[in-house]
Image: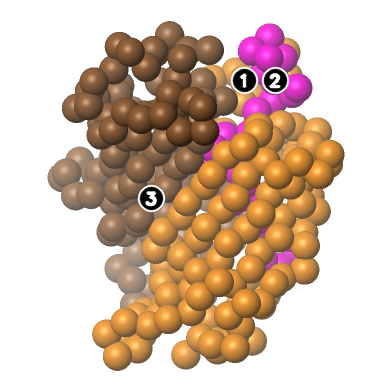
C-alpha cells in the first residue's frame, strides 16, 4: 500500500519535510471558511487587539493540517492510525511553517507492523508551534 | 470560570453531509494539491469511494453547524480567551465526499492550573458514518487564559 516499507525504516529516520509559505491573512480567511472555525480572533485584527493580542494569529488546526501533509505525503492516508499534537506556541500571521517527522519506535500492534513518529511544526526562527506523535501501519 | 458541572455533558449529536465544496475550500486553505483530496476521479482511481477528507477534516465537520461556539457563553467559556491546547485523532476508516457523518461530543474533564489562571476543557468526539461504522475518534483540549 505504500512505497515505504516497515523493514526499510530505522528509529531516527526522518520523513520528507513539508515547508509552507508565509501564512497570509488571506490564508486565515480561507481556513476560517473551510474549517468552520469562525472565531474572529483569527481574521479580525480589531477583535484580536481588543482581546489583548498584537494581531490575528493562525488557527492551531491550520498548522495541524500542514503537519498532516508531511504524513500523507510520505505514506497513503489509509496507513495513518493516530495523529495527535500539543499546540506549544501561537502561530502568527507571517510565520513560515516547516513540518518534520522522525521515526521513534517500531512495533507490532493489533496484528499490524506500525511505526511511531515524533512530528513537529516550527516557524522560520525554529520556534516550535506543534509537537506530537503519529502512528502509521506499514507492510 | 468554566462551569465544572459540564463534565460528562454530551452535546446533541450532529449529523452533517461531507460536501465536495467544503473539501475543496479546506484543501485550498491548507495548500493541499494532491488530486485525491480535490477530484472524484483521482480519488476513485486511488481506491476511495470519492474525494478523501484530509486527516484533520473531522474537526471541521464538528464545527459545521450554525453556531458551533453557541454553548460556550452558558458554560463560562469566552472566545477571546481560548486557545487550542491539544488535538488528537484516531482513525478507523476514511471519510469521503458523499458520506453522512455523525459526531457526538462529550466533555470528559474540566480542570485548572496555576490557581485558576489557566483552565482546561477536554472533549472527546466519536465520528460515525452513514453505515453506523465508527470511522474515528477525536480528543480536543481547549485552554482558557485569565
Q: Are marks 3 and 2 on the same chain?
A: no
Task: Please say whether residue B73 is visible from this viewpoint.
Answer: no
Secondary-structure class at tag 2: loop
Q: CA distance from mark 1 to mark 3?
A: 25 Å
Q: Are marks 1 and 3 in contact (CB under 8 Å)?
A: no
Q: CA distance from mark 1 to mark 2?
A: 8 Å
Q: Count residues near mark 1 (Cα–Cα under 10 Å), then give few for <14, some for 14-19, many for 20+.
A: many
Residue B49 highlighted magenta (yes or no): yes
Quadrant assignment, res A8: top left
Q: Find disc 1 in the rendering and name its residue.
A: B36
Which scheme is used to colour this image of the protein?
by chain
**Residue B70 x, y percent position in the rendering:** 67, 75
**Residue A90 x, y percent position in the rendering:** 31, 59
**Residue B95 x, y percent position in the rendering:** 68, 35
**Residue B49 x, y percent position in the rendering:** 75, 22
Kindly identify the residue that appears in the image at 32 percent across and 28 percent down.
Answer: A106
Q: Are marks 1 and 2 in contact (CB under 8 Å)?
A: yes
Kindly identify the residue that appears in the image at 59 percent across and 72 percent down.
Answer: B107
Q: CA distance from mark 3 to mark 2?
A: 27 Å
Kindly identify the residue that appears in the image at 33 percent across and 71 percent down.
Answer: A53
Q: Count residues near mark 3 (Cα–Cα under 10 Å), then give few for <14, some for 14-19, many for 20+.
A: many
Mark 1 vs mark 3: in front: 3
Kindly identify the residue that appears in the image at 30 percent across and 48 percent down.
Answer: A131
Residue A118 highlighted magenta (yes or no): no
Q: Find disc 2 in the rendering and name its residue.
A: B48
The chain to which mark 3 is attached is: A
- Residue B144 vertical position relative to residue B13 in the rendered view, above or below: below
Quadrant assignment, res A96: top left
Q: Which chain is brown?
A: A
The chain to which mark 1 is attached is: B
Range of the magenta residues? B42-68
The chain to which mark 2 is attached is: B
Amino acid at each position: 500500500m505504500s512505497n515505504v516499507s516497515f523493514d526499510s525504516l530505522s528509529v531516527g529516520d526522518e520523513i520528507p519535510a513539508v515547508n509552507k509559505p508565509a501564512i497570509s491573512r488571506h490564508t486565515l480567511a480561507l481556513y476560517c471558511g473551510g474549517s468552520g472555525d469562525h472565531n474572529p480572533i483569527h481574521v479580525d485584527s480589531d477583535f484580536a487587539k481588543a482581546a489583548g493580542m498584537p494581531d490575528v494569529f493562525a488557527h492551531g488546526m491550520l498548522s495541524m493540517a500542514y503537519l498532516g501533509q508531511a504524513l500523507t505525503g510520505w505514506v497513503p492516508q489509509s496507513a495513518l492510525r493516530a495523529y495527535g499534537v500539543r499546540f506549544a506556541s501561537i502561530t502568527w500571521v507571517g510565520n513560515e511553517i516547516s513540518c518534520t517527522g522522525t521515526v521513534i519506535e517500531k512495533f507490532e500492534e493489533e496484528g499490524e507492523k506500525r511505526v511511531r513518529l515524533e512530528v513537529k511544526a516550527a516557524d522560520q526562527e525554529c520556534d516550535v508551534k506543534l509537537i506530537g506523535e503519529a502512528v502509521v501501519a506499514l507492510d | 470560570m468554566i462551569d465544572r458541572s459540564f463534565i460528562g455533558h454530551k452535546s446533541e449529536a450532529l449529523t452533517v453531509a461531507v460536501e465536495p465544496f467544503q473539501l475543496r475550500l479546506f484543501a485550498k486553505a491548507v495548500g493541499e494539491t494532491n488530486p485525491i483530496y480535490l477530484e472524484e476521479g483521482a480519488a476513485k482511481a486511488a481506491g476511495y469511494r470519492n474525494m478523501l477528507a484530509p486527516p484533520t477534516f473531522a474537526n471541521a465537520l464538528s464545527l459545521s453547524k450554525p453556531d458551533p461556539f453557541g454553548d460556550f457563553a452558558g458554560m463560562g467559556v469566552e472566545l477571546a480567551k481560548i486557545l487550542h491546547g491539544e488535538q488528537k485523532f484516531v482513525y478507523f476508516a476514511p471519510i469521503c465526499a458523499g458520506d453522512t457523518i455523525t459526531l457526538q461530543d462529550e466533555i470528559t474533564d474540566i480542570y485548572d492550573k496555576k490557581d485558576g489562571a489557566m483552565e482546561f476543557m477536554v472533549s472527546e468526539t466519536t465520528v460515525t458514518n452513514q453505515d453506523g461504522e465508527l470511522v474515528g475518534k477525536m480528543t480536543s483540549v481547549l485552554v482558557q487564559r485569565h
